[in-house]
Image (spheres, rainbow, N blue to C red):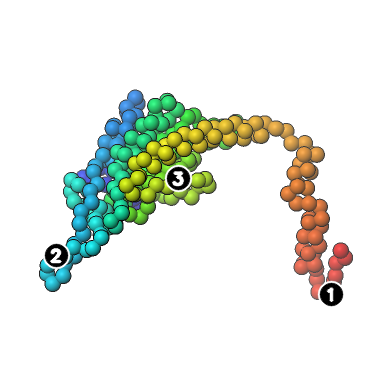
Amino acid sequence: MAHNLEITNGKASFAYAGRPGWHGLGQAIPPGMEDSETVSELAGLNRTVALVPLYTMVGGEPVAVPEKFATVYADTGFVLGVVGTRYTVVQNVTAFKAIDRWLADGRVRYETAGALDEGRKVFILVRIGEDFTIAGTDPVTPYALVTNSHDGSSGLGVKLVSTRVVCQNTLNVSLREKGERIGIRHTASAEANIESAAQALGLVSRQQAEMMQRFEQLAQMNAGQTLVEQVVELVAPTRQRSKSASRSASATAPSGVTTAS
């Protein structure tokens, strides 16, 4: 399936506010119910992940694999991944609790949340403040993306993005966007680091708002001929452009014809 959403008992592990995803799957978040408990339940992200010893069969007998554990859904035993002894499970509810702190200022609200690859990967997308429109034509929607995994492939991450995540492909696009991603490893200090990430993201989101205001100011500036020439000279000085033109002419001149410099 192109969307790669987890499907449990015919129900997609995906919740959304406003418009649905292109796949038409998932559960709508009722207006006024944008709290972590409701969103996590609608998206199927309120399940508990547990660590269990990993065994292999040797001569028909189960033998424990040293320093290896399986991450499983506690309710079904479904295996999500294999991890080492230092790995600490970061439950989805822990990530939601960190987001609750951002919700308190009224500028942040849930946009989408879901599980991918049979629950091995999780994303939570929150909208930060209001949309920006640059020069009255280019809308920009600021989001904060929280990602988590339960298969040992990656830690928990927080990143500012502009892509609305509704599936595996849109998640991939958002992760490739320019900008810093705050990464948190699945260790004993993970929960404390999530709190630090929440504080850092709040600062970065305010900086983003200031940056958007500067973009709008720049878009309103009228660039006269003199300013354009100054910018061109700064980026590509006259001497550099002359040398480039000379090399280009030499490369394209017919055989036996030379160019003067």
SS category of the residue bearing label 2: strand
* As drawn, 158 above or below 202: below
Toward the viewer: 207 or 36? 207
Disc marking residue 235: none
Q: Which residue is disc 3 drawn over?
A: 182
Other residues around mark 3 within 10 Å, as few (<14) / some (14–19) / many (≥20): some
Image quarter where the C terminus lies is bottom right
Task: Say whether residue 243 is left or right of residue 201.
Answer: right
User: What is the distance, in whole Å, between disc 1 and disc 2 at their CAs?
Assistant: 82 Å
Q: Which residue is disc 1 drawn over?
A: 256
Earlier-in-chain disc, 2 versus 3? 2
- Residue drawn at x 54%, y 35% is 208
Are discs 1 and 2 less than 8 Å apart at CB? no
- Residue drawn at x 29%, y 32% is 38
Toward the viewer: 141 or 251? 141
- Residue drawn at x 79%, y 43% is 229
Q: Residue furthest bottom?
A: 256
Classify residue 97 by image quadrant: top left
Q: Residue furthest left?
A: 60
Q: Which residue is disc 2 drawn over?
A: 62
Image coordinates for residue 160, horizontal then vertical, percent: 48, 40
